[in-house]
Amino acid sequence: MNAHPCPTEAAALAARVARAADIPSLERLLSSPEGQELAGLFGRSRLASALRQVLEDMRGQVLAGEMQLAHLSVTNLLAQARCHIDAQEKPRLRIVYNLTGTVLHTNLGRALLPDEAVQAVVRAMTAPANLEFNLETGRRGDRDDLVEDLLRELTGAEAATVVNNNAAAVLLMLNTLANRKEAIVSRGELVEIGGAFRIPDIMHRAGARLVEIGTTNRTHPADYEDAIRPRTALLMKVHCSNYAITGFTRSVGLPQIAQIARQHGLPTAVDLGSGTLVDLTQWGLPREDTVRETVEAGADIVTFSGDKLLGGPQAGLIVGNAELIRKIKKNPLKRALRVGKLTLAALEPVLALYRSPELLADRLTTLRLLTRPQAQMRAQAERLQPFLQRALGDNYAVESTAMFSQIGSGALPIDQLPSYGLCVQYAGPGRSGRSLHKLEARLRNLPRPVIGRISQDALWLDLRCLEENDEPAFTAQLQANTP
Ligand SMILES: *Cc1c(COP(=O)(O)O)cnc(C)c1O
């Protein structure tokens, strides 16, 4: 509970109606003992501006004869100013419980960093670091050097560079290699990712002319061959991140595209989207081409995200042929799109975890969440069910039940992971739909918002992303607040 409850009108004990002359001066409020105490906490100028706001809000009501004198006490006015300040203090970026079932949820910040990365970020934030300083020579260094060796080792590529996100990686790659030239892409791969990333638009902004080939469902090797002209700069393959084309389909595999490109002396670029560094089937997850496989299949440039399946910070990784990477790094846009030191600080330890693949499912948060045993989530659901049922009361029926999670962020869009969680149905009078939406909003308004999803006349809370060490705080919140 807030120690300084906002005074409400009901709290006022009306003695008489206030007049303008009753409004205390700012000076009197600031120099009162309570005012001085608050000024010590927040600074005099900030308190003064909050008080000015309070007085201004009051003046109109006083002039209209709508204000009781008791409202104008020093204590009351200062308490109102404190409310203004408290409202400002609340951070806009708040942590939430992601019970949506989507592990890499773009709107909830995608990958969670493992502890090694968090510690590295804290160190880099609070002390100077050799971001662009070569400690061997004492000369200026290159920030990409911090992770390039690791990226080469993990992907088999000759060279690597890092930018702010994968959209930036694609933009920079296309602008460097295909500006004022043509880039060939299959119509089946002209993807739009959430948040307004569309391959044709990026292509345009990069200065490249998109040459679409084939049809939505079928593209053949001859389509690539026939589209190659003197102005062709590259052949591009884009991962169909958030959709699947099934039925009567045909697409050309990367080895074949790369072979056609090579015969014409052209590079092949692949936007891998999520981009995983390890074979996910070893953990029973759906298959996804790794970056190494993509390089081996003949891609000269591969771009992928840092905060999707990789499980690291937001970043765009570009790996591939040394000469092409050199050109990309020389593009002035690289300077505009480069990553900050906090990103690099987080990225290095995340990549380093991949040196021990057997330990990855335990240490890399994203993979740990994706591979949580269903039995573990089931036991958790059974433990949490009574807490939620008690908190919601008799108008709702809470059941622990099996459900399906998604990886999210355009990784393996149609595959679902067997999960477990809580399903809430409305059991009271009146319409269920509105009551469920109200409940969803109430959970979303808890001190640490709980984000679930409504589907099939129920609110689903998938427990995959509620790790066991989050559980005490989760139940404590349910006990302390009636959502
Ligand atoms: C996600 C995705 C992007 C954008 O990556 P960001 O890191 O979010 O900028 C680009 N291309 C594909 C195929 C993707 O899946």
Image (cartoon, grey):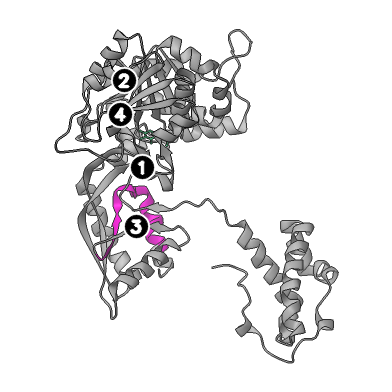
Q: Residue at x 62, y 57 (%)?
A: 89
Q: Quadrant of the N terminus?
A: bottom right
Q: Check disc 2 and give the amino acid type.
A: Ala
Q: Nearer the viewer, mark 3 or mark 2?
A: 2
Residue 216 forms part of the magenta stretch: no
Nearer-N-terminus badge (3/2): 2
Residue closer to the observer: 348 or 314: 314
Left or right? Give the position of 128 relative to 414. Answer: right
Q: Which residue is mark 2?
A: 227
Looking at the rendered structure, which numbered label has been put on residue 261? Answer: none
Q: Residue at x 54, y 23 (%)?
A: 334
Left or right? Give the position of 179 relative to 81. Answer: left
Q: Check disc 1 and give the amino acid type.
A: Leu
Q: Which residue is mark 4?
A: 359
Furthest residue to the left?
A: 248
Residue closer to the observer: 362 or 200: 200
Q: Check disc 4 and give the amino acid type.
A: Leu
Q: Helix, strand or loop at disc 1? A: loop
Nearer-N-terminus badge (1/4): 1
Q: Position of residue 265 (x, y in %)?
A: 35, 8
Start and end of the magenta stretch?
457-477
- Ligand 1 is found in the corner quadrant, namely top left
Nearer-N-terminus badge (1/3): 1
Nearer-N-terminus badge (4/3): 4
Q: Position of residue 456 (x, y in %)?
A: 23, 62
Q: Check disc 3 and give the amino acid type.
A: Gly
